[in-house]
Amino acid sequence: MRLTPLPAFSDNYIWLLDEDDARLVVDPGDAAPVLAACEADGRAPLAILLTHHHDDHVGGVPALLARWPGLPVYGPADPRIAGVDHPVGDGDRVGIGPWRFDVLAVPGHTVSHIAFHGSGLLFCGDTLFSLGCGRLFEGTPRDMLGSLDRLAALPAQTLVCCGHEYTLANAAFARVVDPDNPALRRRQEEAIAMRDRGLPTLPTTLGSERDGNPFLRIDVPAVRAAVAAHAPGAADDRIEAFAGLRRWKDGFRA
């Protein structure tokens, strides 16, 4: 199995998953990188997976369908997404070639956001990032925290394949929140070295995220204390603490 993050726009990743002669495309916001990769090796995708409706994740679908008419497109049952001919939702199982994915509803960033989990992989769009999480454009803090709790319960070795190269910016904030966390420090150092070499910091593992991502550590006393110090009264319960942490990140400037 080969997993390739194709850079798109300023910081997006489109994911290609290959095994033998089978290929999947995940969240193609731009068709050009996908077409270039497929033309380079002469291999066409079996299907497209979509996690949510934002254009930087779905904008390339029409051009890909023009190139490969009838290509199956799996995504949320959301009228804002054109081209989905296999709408899927929570609890569905998707079988494509050698892969099987469970569909998980993970609202928060958008209300209809889904993730695909299987074959040791998690395609989570803009719900979970390395050392961060998505902004709450449509959902509530309760929604997002529930979604992150659900993802955090997956096996530690799961590879997290998210939609953006945000690791360094997220690490800068996380170190302010949780400065004495050695796992977080190691992840930041690793990410800096990777970016210095022009490499993606993704995928990461869910175990690494559980150790270093403050949004998955809202019940850790050090994180809760940092939120309370920044916004007194915001850490009285875990949902309010999470909301306070997300607001803090929204206004953070390194």
Image (cartoon, rainbow, N blue to C red):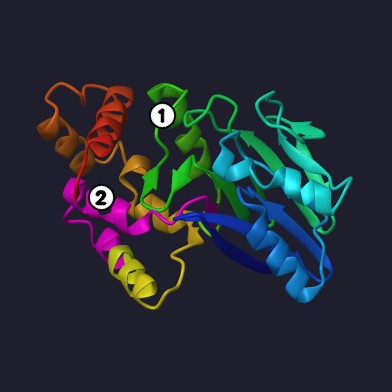
Residue ID at (26%, 41%): 220
**Residue 49 seen in the current view:** yes
Is residue 56 part of the magenta span, yes or no? no
Residue ID at (39%, 73%): 194
- Give the tally of numbered discs: 2
Label 1 environment density (alpha carbons within 10 Å; few <14, some 14–19, many ≥20): many
Q: Nearer the viewer, residue 223 or 43?
A: 43
Q: Are marks 1 and 2 in contact (CB under 8 Å)?
A: no
Which residue position holds label 1?
Answer: 136
Residue ID at (48%, 59%): 205
SS assignment at label 2: helix
In the image, is 89 to the left or to the right of 151?
A: right
Q: Which image quadrant is residue 25 in?
A: bottom right
SS assignment at label 1: loop
Q: Which mark is residue 206?
A: none
Label 2 environment density (alpha carbons within 10 Å; few <14, some 14–19, many ≥20): many
Q: CA distance from mark 1 to mark 2?
A: 18 Å
Q: Which mark is residue 174?
A: 2
Q: Nearer the viewer, residue 54 or 183?
A: 54
Q: Nearer the viewer, residue 243 or 65?
A: 65
What amino acid type is highlighted by mark number 2? Answer: Ala
Q: Where is residue 102 drawn, in percent x and y?
A: 70, 42
Instruction: Please determine whether, in this image, residue 244 is positioned above or below residue 184.
Output: above
Query: For the magenta stretch, what is the residue range?
Result: 159-186
Q: Where is residue 66 drawn, in percent x and y?
A: 82, 48
What amino acid type is highlighted by mark number 1? Answer: Leu
